Image (cartoon, rainbow, N blue to C red):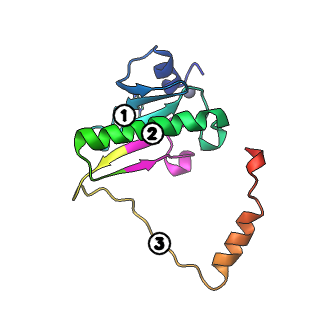
Amino acid sequence: MTDCIFCKIISGSIPAEILYENDKALAVLDINPIHYGHALILPKQHCTDFLSLPEESYQSVLQAAKVVTQALVDSLKLEGFNLFSNNGTIAGQSVFHFHLHITPRYRDDDIRFVLNLQKYSDGDLKRYGTMIRKFINPSAL
Ligand code: AMP
Ligand code: ZN
């Protein structure tokens, strides 16, 4: 994809602070970090979101995520981290090349996902389980 900023990083046409790469994934520092060390894991093959990530990239993407997370934990002496991915504009995705964020967390860093947690009303937990299970289809990936 010629107009994709992450494809440009992967091809080397724009610079990035590369932390690690394997055959199908690249890890870089995010230029606008939540905390210093905030890393991004990019599949080398362009795909817009998690659902379009090709199956042959799963292992490399997760391997890179674990290698880099371990390095963040060891180098920055982290007690915790967040691993997340925004998918779709409504979920906060701004670069439409799938990526995982790995960000250090610190005690009292005052970062919060503002959640308005609900409770299932009677029968709804089972109803939702039943409805979603009807669509579980591993062979459609
Ligand atoms: P998202 O909003 O989940 O799509 O995340 C995109 C992330 O990419 C943001 O956190 C940006 O700071 C980061 N980003 C955008 N351009 C670059 C770049 N050239 N190098 C590194 N990170 C970038
Ligand atoms: Zn791309």
Residue 60: give x, y in percent of width and height. 54, 33
Instruction: Tell me the amino acid under the disc marked 3.
Output: Leu
In the rendered structure, the answer to whether residue 3 lies left or right of residue 73 reads right
**Does the closest atom of ligand 1 sit within 8 Å of the Cβ of label 1?**
yes
User: In which quadrant of the rendered view does residue 113 lie?
Assistant: bottom left
Left or right: where does residue 45 sit relative to residue 17? right
Q: Which mark is residue 65?
A: 2
Nearer the N terminus, badge 3 or badge 1? 1
Q: Could you tell me which quadrant the N terminus lies in?
A: top right
Q: How many other residues sit within 10 Å of disc 3, few (<14), some (14-19) or many (≥20)?
A: few
**Tag 3 and tag 1, C-beta contact below 8 Å:** no
Residue density around tag 1, few if under 14, some if 14–19, many if 20 or more, within 10 Å = many
The residue depicted at 77 percent of the width and 46 percent of the height is: 140
Type of amino acid under label 2: Ala
Q: Position of residue 26 (x, y in %)?
A: 47, 27
42 and 73: which is toward the camera: 73
Mark 2 Cα shell of 10 Å, populated few (<14), some (14-19), many (≥20)? many
Residue 24 drawn in magenta: no
Tag 2 secondary structure: helix
Residue named by callout 1: 30
Amino acid under disc 1 = Asp
Where are the magenta residues, as a range? 82-102
Quadrant of the frame with the C terminus = top right
User: Eyeballing the image, is 128 above or below 31?
Assistant: below
Magenta includes 98? yes
Q: Position of residue 95 (x, y in %)?
A: 50, 35
Q: Give the Cα separation between the discs numbered 3 and 2.
A: 28 Å
